[in-house]
Image: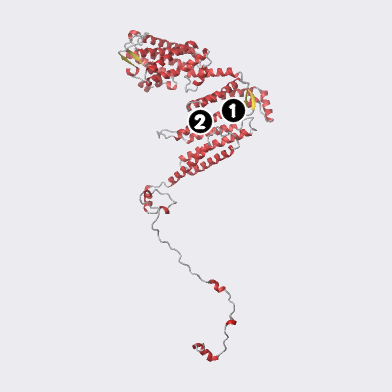
Amino acid sequence: MAAEKLSDAKVSPVEDGKESDEGLGLEILQVVKDSQQQHGLRHGDYQRYRGYCSRRLRRLRKTLGFRMGNRHKFTGKKVTVEMLTDHRYLLLVVMEAERAWSYAMQLKQEANTEPRKRFHLLARLRKAAKHGEQLERLCESPRVDAKTKLEAQAYTAYLTGMVQFELQEWKSAMEAFNKCKTIYEKLASAFTEEQAVLYRQRVEEISPNIRYCAYNIGDQNAINDLMQMRLSAGGGGGMMAEKLEALITQTRAKQAATMSEVEWRGRTVPVKIDKARIFLLGLADNEAAIAQAADEETKERLYETLLAECRDTIQAVREELRADGKQRERAVDSTESGKVSNVQYLHSYLTYIKLWTVVRRNESMAHALQAKLKEPQPDENKRGPRPQDLIRLYDIILQSLAELSTLHGLEEDHTFQKEVALKTLVYKAYRCFFIAQSYVLVKKWSEALVLYERVLKYAREVQSKAKHLNNSLKDLPDVQELIAEVNAEKYSLQAAAILDKEDVPEAPVQQQVKDNTPLSERLDTFHLDPSLLGKQPNLVQFPPDFQPIPCKPLFFDLALNHVAFPPLDDKVEQKGKGGLTGYIKGIFGFGS
């Protein structure tokens, strides 16, 4: 609080207004918007803004010498035309109006639980409009420039319209809002684009109020414009958002009188509960609004609204089942025969809508997180999205699908069970994929690789089963893209694992490069060798070293020892016996 007081302790005249030859000037809308955004209204804290207005009023009165008596006695004073020598006198009236308006908005929030505060709310709104009228009368003075006069008229018309809107005086409120809108549109067209942005924002804020007043006056076409405005992030502010939701519910209640039954999965069920009729009638509009949502924030808000309505409707149907004892007995009997009661089947249908909406909402959030996960983080100290966040979302999706398979009345619907099983496989694959990525972040390469293989197994199983189910993958993520992404991640993982294993100090690497081992002899090991990129890369050893080779072989005729030759006795000449004389001749060669 001390910091806030210091931040608004001094306000320069250049910020709030100007004094020129044309007269006093005050940027009323600019001052109001800046004060609101800086002091609480960005978060809907009207009490804080009210305190800021009170402190600023005290400082302005002290600076201008515009005191309301002394500490012992209060003496009321009003700003008059004769006092308009400084634009801060106009600012004084603006802050009084803002203080009353912020108090009224604070009471509006509290009136939801304490209805008696509505009377005090109306009194403070009237007080704000009274201060606005005083501002407009002061600005009629010739001392004030033309732009400030127009802004004062628009500001007064806006406060008057708020009072009439709360009193449900639709025609008067519409006239006041139209006057305000016309003035701001004229101002926006008369100034530069930068100055006109603020005026156009104010026109967009009051447009839903004008449509709402037109509808209550009798313009039935205005409901379509209001339904489109519901897609805007704010819906026209807190007060307008509540009235818009009530109006949409009232319109659907009128149309629900003609709705008597609903068909789901080949069975027609009568709908006798009014709340269920209203919800089912607006289901298509809600889904269309979600599909047309401009950003993820609006889409998430519409999902939450749809889920809240669905839970209330399920509770109403559950109370109907609990109150009607005979109906419950018939449901038990029919379950034994294979068919549940109509009310129980309606309950299953609404539960299916709720669970499938949860699946779609979490899938939408997962897509947004995936996009942020792929973006580079500018600030490393700031925590960004992580794969663990996506794992949690897919856990909730799988839990919802598990509940879908246990719905009453669908146990024997084999097609439904197969569809749920197929969807479960798809989301299991995506969950497994992000678990693998979380392991990659902590450098658990083997675990991540195993999980990537599991993802591919799930994806191929989905593709094989989807052939037998028509349109089963229509509303589901594309598993083919997942397969391609997993294959790419696997290669990146393997490269990262190799680099991580070879992450050794620099000196040993240099020593290993100096041993002049050619690349052809160390293909099984990876080392960073800058010389491979130079003009003389060490790829192979040239000339190659001499290597011993075997000599020319010697051939031996081993088969000769095993050959049996034919006898040649008959061809050999028989020589007679010569005795000693013959022996001697034979030795010396005489007998030859």
Q: Which residue is mark 1?
A: 351
Decide which of 566, 309 is in the foreground and name it. Answer: 566
- Does residue 124 appear in the picture of this structure? no
Q: Would residue 138 be visible to someone looking at this image?
A: yes
The N terminus sits in image quarter: top left
- The figure's colour scheme reads secondary structure
Say which quarter of the image contains residue 568.
Answer: bottom right
Image x and y of residue 179, in percent: 43, 12
Q: Position of residue 435 (x, y in %)?
A: 50, 38
Secondary structure, mark 2, is helix
Q: Earlier in the sequence, mark 1 or mark 2?
A: 1
Q: Is residue 491 above or below residue 179?
A: below
Q: Which label belongs to residue 364?
A: 2
Q: Amino acid at mark 1?
A: Thr
Amino acid tagged 2: Ser
Is label 1 in a helix, a strand or a loop? helix
- Foreground of the two, 361 or 508: 361
Residue 499 numbered mark, or none: none
What residue do we see at 50% from left, 21% from top? 228
Q: Are marks 1 and 2 in contact (CB under 8 Å)?
A: no
Give residue 286's position: percent from left, percent from top.
Answer: 54, 24
Q: Nearer the viewer, mark 1 or mark 2?
A: 2
Q: Residues within 10 Å of mark 2 (few under 14, many from 20)?
A: some
Residue at 58%, 22% (x, y): give it. Answer: 281
Camera-side residue: 427 or 88? 427
Q: Residue furthest bottom?
A: 581
Dot 1, crowdedness within 10 Å: few (<14), some or many (≥20)? some
Image position, residue 570 (x, y; %):
60, 82
